[in-house]
Amino acid sequence: MKKEMRYLVPGDYMADPAVHVFNGRVYIYPSHDWESGIPENDNGDHFNMKDYHVFSTDDVMHGEIKDHGVVLATEDIPWAGRQLWDSDVAFKNGKYYMYFPLKDKNDIFRIGVAVSDSPEGPFIPQPDPIKGSYSIDPAILDDGDGCYYMYFGGLWGGQLQRYRDNKALESAVLPTGNEPALPGRVAKLSDDMLQFAEEPRPVVILDENGKPLTAGDNERRFFEASWMHKYNGKYYFSYSTGDTHLLCYAIGDNPYGPFTYQGVILTPVVGWTTHHAIAEYKGKWYLFHHDCVPSEGKTWLRSLKVCELEYDSEGKIITIDGGGE
Ligand code: FUB
């Protein structure tokens, strides 16, 4: 379905939105793309982001989008190497916690936490990354019962293939063909929100026969860009399929899954990556995402977009046309 689309920040390049409603306003936490001159490669070196802005609005499709400025930068993070990728923010007990992936000084992605008294930042980073963290794209579920869960992971440049059972491998191997696909990960957060409360677990996605999706099923298997939202008491785990450029989703009964594959949320956009957040505001649901139309296809210069998202009477998400190939 073709939808009315809005570019949210036409004057700058922003991507990978995380979106939450705090204090009655919509807060958007994107990655901040820029032209760093690094050549494009499969490792994602061209995504060389170095800071985050926060945006907010009280009218998603038509209102003013307020830029709260730079809220965290690599130069403020003691353990920083390079590449601030997709972040997310959660609220608990009067504090806001920003979770961000960043390569450390050994060029290994870790996930860090930075804390603020306001959803608008600035966020003050902890001295070290979360113990036992790895890979990219943290997304936080506030389950409403005092428990918070982090979903994370990404293949290729996101380094997930370097780990099995939360241990680093000597050499990275991607499964192929009928082998089970590499899953994303989920971990409950500690009470103070600064560490994992448990070893990360696999986010298993099953097909219609109850079998885990296979590595060769790259139109459906997980690649990166985890997001979790709840609808009618069910857990909707959504993600990007990476090299097939789809946003898909799977439904489960609890935060750990397993989740059963349901379908495509967004067909490919213009640009290699696709990444999103789903949020409800004032009784409507929205799909926040990005594409590379304004940069004329430069995959490292992405622009934030939003459109409405609809469910059918059985809770299935109606597929949206991304406008790409
Ligand atoms: O922005 C860098 C990476 O591109 C993100 O972490 C991925 O999800 C993809 O959007």
Image (spheres, grey):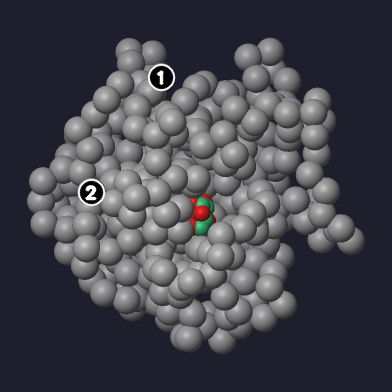
Dot 1 lies on which element?
Answer: loop
Dot 2 lies on which element?
Answer: strand
Indicate left or right for 47 with 54 as reference: right
Tell me if residue 28 comes above or below residue 293 in the rendering. below
Tag shown at residue 316: 1
Residue located 67% across and 34% down the image: 204
Tag shown at residue 65: none
Q: Toward which corner of the image does residue 53 lie, by quadrant?
A: bottom left
Query: The N terminus lies in which quarter of the figure?
Result: top left
Counting from the top left corner in percent of width and height, residue 290 is at: 36, 47
Query: The C terminus lies in which quarter of the figure?
Result: top left
Residue located 72% across and 77% down the image: 106
Residue located 63% across and 14% down the image: 208
- Between disc 2 and disc 1, whose residue precedes? 2
Counting from the top left corner in percent of width and height, residue 311 is at: 33, 22
Tell me if residue 49 comes above or below residue 147 in the rendering. below
Residue located 89% across and 61% down the image: 170
> Nearest the camera: 325 or 191?
325
**Residue 288, visible in the rendered structure:** yes
**Residue 198, visible in the rendered structure:** no
Residue that carries the numbered disc 2 in the rendered image: 7
Counting from the top left corner in percent of width and height, residue 17 is at: 38, 53
> Nearest the camera: 146 or 314?
314
Indicate left or right for 71 with 115 as reference: left
Label 2 – label 1 distance at C-alpha: 26 Å
Counting from the top left corner in percent of width and height, residue 82 is at: 57, 75
Indicate left or right for 60 with 263 as reference: left
Instruction: Check disc 2 and give the amino acid type.
Output: Tyr
Instruction: Check disc 1 and give the amino acid type.
Output: Lys
| Category of crowding for the residue at label 2, using alpha-carbon neighbours closer than 10 angstroms: few (below 14), some (14–19), many (at least 20) | some
| Category of crowding for the residue at label 1, using alpha-carbon neighbours closer than 10 angstroms: few (below 14), some (14–19), many (at least 20) | some
